[in-house]
Amino acid sequence: DAGVIQSPRHEVTEMGQEVTLRCKPISGHNSLFWYRQTMMRGLELLIYFNNNVPIDDSGMPEDRFSAKMPNASFSTLKIQPSEPRDSAVYFCASSSGLAGKYNEQFFGPGTRLTVL
Amino acid sequence: SQQGEEDPQALSIQEGENATMNCSYKTSINNLQWYRQNSGRGLVHLILIRSNEREKHSGRLRVTLDTSKKSSSLLITASRAADTASYFCATDYGNNRLAFGKGNQVVVIP
């Protein structure tokens, strides 16, 4: 398996523009997580899906952020409009999500977002 | 916050020495996991210890868990330059989500 795939790897955009980050989880994994990592705040969980359904989006910072998972093999995180303070590395991770199991998470390489 | 917190946050050692880092957490956990992050990369799972386990080994890694003190330690023996990375503890409270600490930067000097 290729692991968790994220695109793009780097994104530079101007304030006010829409940004869409993409993630393909590991085949067969039922849970998908979006994280944001910054020096100041560390690794923050933004939203978590199980079987394509959003379970907890309490970490999504504002209404400017939205995430979807239309099927088991694809998820997007959208920021509209983007602001300079959104600059960070965004990670997608997946796990088997099996009930009663100890689930390690597999991380993608991340998308480094810079908003000018 | 229920996140794990690592200590020390930065560690610099010579190649061949052992590196020890600690993690504390606040409430009961299902399991605790350690991850490594190389610069510019995603996190990689290293080892998981269940709440009913006290010690676990994997290669040069040794993890301990003390649930009475709500703490864990990660020991890397005979460190190598390739072990230079950030190390994160993550606590699983049984809801399929992990709460990550802020990370522990380890530099191994050749």
Image: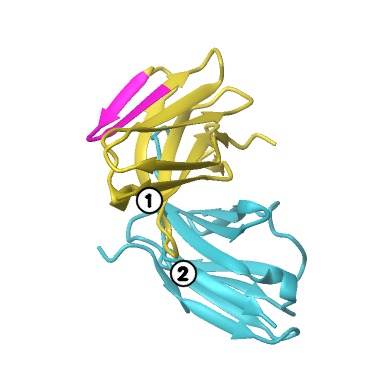
Chain colours: A cyan, B yellow
Q: Residue at left 60%, top 60%?
A: A36
Examine the residues drawn in magenta and state their main secondary structure: strand
Identify the amino acid type marked 1.
Thr
State yes or no: residue B20 in magenta. Answer: no
Is B110 displayed left or right of A98 in the figure? left
Locate residue A8, reporting x and y percent: 47, 79
Q: Circle 2 marks a residue in which chain?
A: A
Locate residue B16, reporting x and y percent: 26, 38
**Residues behind callouts 1 and 2 on a single chain:** no
**Residue that badge 1 annotates:** B84
Mark number displayed over residue A23:
2
Q: Does dot 1 land on a helix, a strand or a loop?
A: loop
Q: Residue at left 38%, top 17%?
A: B54
Q: Does dot 2 land on a helix, a strand or a loop?
A: strand
Packing grade of label 2 (10 A; few <14, some 14-19, many >=20) is many
Position of the N terminus of chain B, as image quadrant, is: top right
Judge whether A95 appears above or below B70 on screen.
Answer: below
Judge whether A30 appears above or below B12 on screen.
Answer: below
A12 or A68, which lies in front? A12
Judge whether B74 appears above or below A18 on screen.
Answer: above
Q: Circle 1 marks a residue in which chain?
A: B
Locate residue B72, reporting x and y percent: 47, 25
Locate residue A25, reporting x and y percent: 40, 63
Q: Residue at left 35%, top 37%?
A: B47
**Magenta region:** B55-64
Give the quadrant of residue B48.
top left
Is residue A99 visible in this depiction of the protein? no
Is A8 displayed left or right of A80 in the figure? left
State yes or no: residue B62 in magenta. Answer: yes
Is residue B60 visible in this depiction of the protein? yes
Q: Residue at left 59%, top 35%?
A: B5
Judge whether B83 appears above or below B23 on screen.
Answer: below
